[in-house]
Image (tube, rainbow, N blue to C red):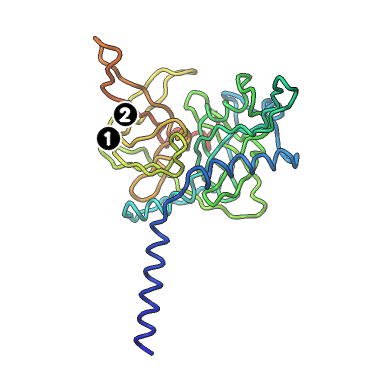
Amino acid sequence: MKYVLKIVLVLCAFTVAVQAQNYKSNIRHYKVPLAIKAGKLIDAGHVISADSLSPSFKNKGYAPVEVNLKSPKKKSLKPSELYNRVSESIVIVSPAGRCGEVDEKGKACDKVHTYPASGYIIDSKGIIVTNYHVANSYITKYNKDARDVMVVMLKDGTIFPVEAILSADQKNDLAILKIDTKGRELPVLPIATKDAEIGDPVFIVSHPKGYYYAFSSGMVTDKFSEINIGGYRNIMAISADFAAGSSGSAIIDQFGNVIGTVSYTKTLQHSDDATKTQMVLKATIPVSALTELIKKGN
């Protein structure tokens, strides 16, 4: 009996190990379901279009946001533990819309267009942080084919329509969105109480170019101010990799606390030969800009 029990325990442990090492299909698990589920929301009609959401979207002028922030964590985690904890709170944020373009035969295209970016949950009731430019990509007049709904998709594939823009800050490239979770409590990322320092370790879980829930690490490489629309803003440069699709994701410390938000990359080229890339500057918005937006508005 003991021998049989031992075999069963070994098999169970092996099964768990195998499950933990499964490889995801970015297309089958995320890209295709995102379009299909967004299409179902559009067809059901329980969505807020870009035109309807547009009046509430401003570059500034918002009041403080009522948010139940989670207290910062103090226990350092191994990278694998950090990924498992953080990734559940990272979301896909995407505008979506049925094409509707009519071909030469008079047939309308039924394809659902999506343009996925990233975001993260800061309140279990459904408050999401992303970039201003991500929200603006839905509202802007240049968005011609994805204006039916803006969606937030969780790691497990659950999808929600965005129902409100609670705050936005063009200068600091931040936006705070609201979804109706239908009573579901969402996993939340805690917010650090101070900005990181140069040399501190950083981690990112994001969706670079359709590689959903990719994990990257590095450190803070620089802290500087730059002129942007509306005046100066502070930037935290990091060495952890991210790319298009990562916009709006959280920069995390070794404890799992948010210390910044992905914003943009800038290719630095040789002054004598513009074709030679020497470095890619990866710019993020420090957490202090987010906490100020939440507590004071803009």
Residue 82 is situated, as x and y percent measured from the top left of the image, at: 37, 52
Residue 278 is situated, as x and y percent measured from the top left of the image, at: 26, 22
Which amino acid type is shown beneath numbered disc 2? Lys
Left or right of 133 on screen, residue 78: left
Question: Within 10 Å of the Cα at label 1, are there few (<14), some (14-19), or many (20+) other Cα atoms?
Answer: some
- Name the residue rendered at 69%, 25% in the picture: 55
The answer to which quarter of the image holds residue 288 is top left
- Between disc 1 and disc 2, whose residue precedes? 1
- Name the residue rendered at 57%, 42% in the picture: 32
The answer to which quarter of the image holds residue 233 is top left
How many marks are shown on the rendered structure? Answer: 2
Which amino acid type is shown beneath numbered disc 1? Ile
Left or right of 96 on screen, residue 232: left
Residue farthest toward the top in the current orientation of the protein? 272
Label 1 sits on residue: 198
Marks 1 and 2 sit apart, C-alpha to C-alpha, by: 7 Å
Residue 279 is situated, as x and y percent measured from the top left of the image, at: 28, 24
Residue 61 is situated, as x and y percent measured from the top left of the image, at: 60, 25
Secondary structure type for disc 2: strand
Label 2 sits on residue: 223
Disc marking residue 25: none
Is the Cβ of the residue at disc 1 closer than 8 Å to that at disc 2? yes
Question: Within 10 Å of the Cα at label 2, are there few (<14), some (14-19), or many (20+) other Cα atoms?
Answer: some
Secondary structure type for disc 1: loop
